[in-house]
Image (cartoon, rainbow, N blue to C red):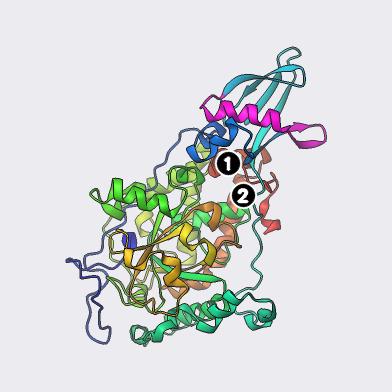
Amino acid sequence: MGCFESRTSVPEAAGKVHDVGRAVPKPTEGVMDDDLDWITGDKSPVTPARALATSERNAGYLADAPLDVVVQIELEGGWRDCSTEETRAICQHLAKGETAFQIHARGQNYYIDFSRPDEGGIQANVSTGKKRKLRILDKEEDEPVAEEDGVGSADPSSASAAASPEVSLQRSYGPQSKRGGASMHPYRVLEGNDHAKKCFAQFEANEARLCGEWAVFYHSYSFAALIYEVHAAVGSVLFRFRSQYATLPRILVHEFKETPDAATLKKRFNEEFATNKRDHHPDFRRVGLSVMCSLASTGPEACVAMVFIAGYSCKDLSFRGVLENLLESCYVPKAKVRKLADEIIAMSEKHGLDVSQFGGKACHSGKPGHLMQLFIKRHLVDKLVYAAKPYGPVDDERMPISKWMDSNSSTQIGQARVLAHPKYFMQANCVRMFVASADPTFHRNRQEFQNELIQKLSLILGEPSLRERAATGIYGGTLPSWWTAEDQRKHA
């Protein structure tokens, strides 16, 4: 499973499957340690110019094509949309990388300045010197929606009368991990571990409830958990992400500028990574997740159940600096970063999260593994996912992967790579996630841990101007159309 998978020292043939009824190699044998080098700690300013200069966006700014952003100006009555002409003129300059320039609008000359990310955009009347704030929103982006049903809620058959034929067909096939006569023998490794059995039973229930409209994937991780938890808390504070259900693997939208979809990720793999670290290249891992396609997966190279209960054996490495870089990249004021990192590590220890790689304590159970259940709306599968062989090459026999996932075939054998784009992962009508922790203590305490972490970040990012600056930088220089500077959690 790419970054966080179980690997033997010699790669197996793609079709070879472990018989988990026998003695099998422990997942710790030959594990490729994830050194978190995909977290760059990039401190370069994230301006609208950086966001709008991408090739797939700026073509519309130079013609009469529909605009994909809205430029707003702050007037006495609040934020108001600028005219289409003003918006296009501003975007034309920004798309060329210009951050300070003049435009002519409404019979006046205006100086526009987006060169100072800490202050946002400024419009100054050249004649009078009067200044007003500007900001840029992505146009008509869907608002994040609440989960229409929480864990363990009503039977989806209640909505069957309104279901499309495609959804009805998927429901008739049943949960993805049980399709095609899939064997449940991998679950034998869960015997004697009641906590793990309960976690897998809940995942099975989620699959049964959501199989009509959603394809499901499974992502295993260990000491990246703290990074994912911080992402989730920041996403909750700034973007309405429902962190009580799951962590958030990636949050920096601007890091997806060059890789906006799975097709581009495949292209980059073939051209850049195939002969250079493959899916372990930092640029690949910055945007991509390694996943299996069944809860009962048997390979190649990884069994989800076995990886979950066995945990990971990591080298004696310290990623305290990585945590601090992450906090800075999420716009925590630099003067508060070190103290906040100390508090987060202490908070993690209190609730049982293994932070031994960050200078803290290991979890008492010795099982630092976590499993993310990742549901993607079926119409988005090909946009965000490609079928993969071990280490990341495209598995052409299972492409397009949506056809395979929509079939009644077994998905027990087969990996995939998911583009973890935050714009989709933070919208519950596109992607839904649930997590389980192999350590029973942290699994039980996770929601309380998230609440405390969110409260801490809410105080630090409490000032509306700082909140807007952080959201703009994280989101890539623009903001979602629904965004406001107030605390976003009450809207979740």
Label 2–label 1 contact, CB within 8 A? yes
Q: Residue 238 carries which label?
A: 2
Region in magenta: 73-99
In percent of width and height, residue 194 lies at 43, 85
| Horizontal side of residue 9 vs 350, given as left or right | left
Q: In this view, does 140 lie above or below 393?
A: above
Q: Is residue 361 magenta?
A: no
In percent of width and height, residue 335 lies at 51, 37
Residue that sits furthest to the right in the current view = 77
Q: What element carries label 1?
A: helix
In percent of width and height, residue 40 lies at 39, 43
Q: Residue at image x 44%, y 69%?
A: 403
Q: Which amino acid does label 1 sit on?
A: Ala
Which of the marked residues, 2 or 1, is nearer the chain's N terminus?
Answer: 2
Residue that sits furthest to the front in the current view = 64
Q: Residue 470 carries which label?
A: 1
Q: Residue at image x 77%, y 17%?
A: 107
- Kindly report the distance in space between the C-alpha atoms of the residues bearing marks 2 and 1: 8 Å
| Horizontal side of residue 110 vs 152, given as left or right | right
| Horizontal side of residue 293 vs 150, given as left or right | left
Q: What residue type is labelled 2?
A: Leu
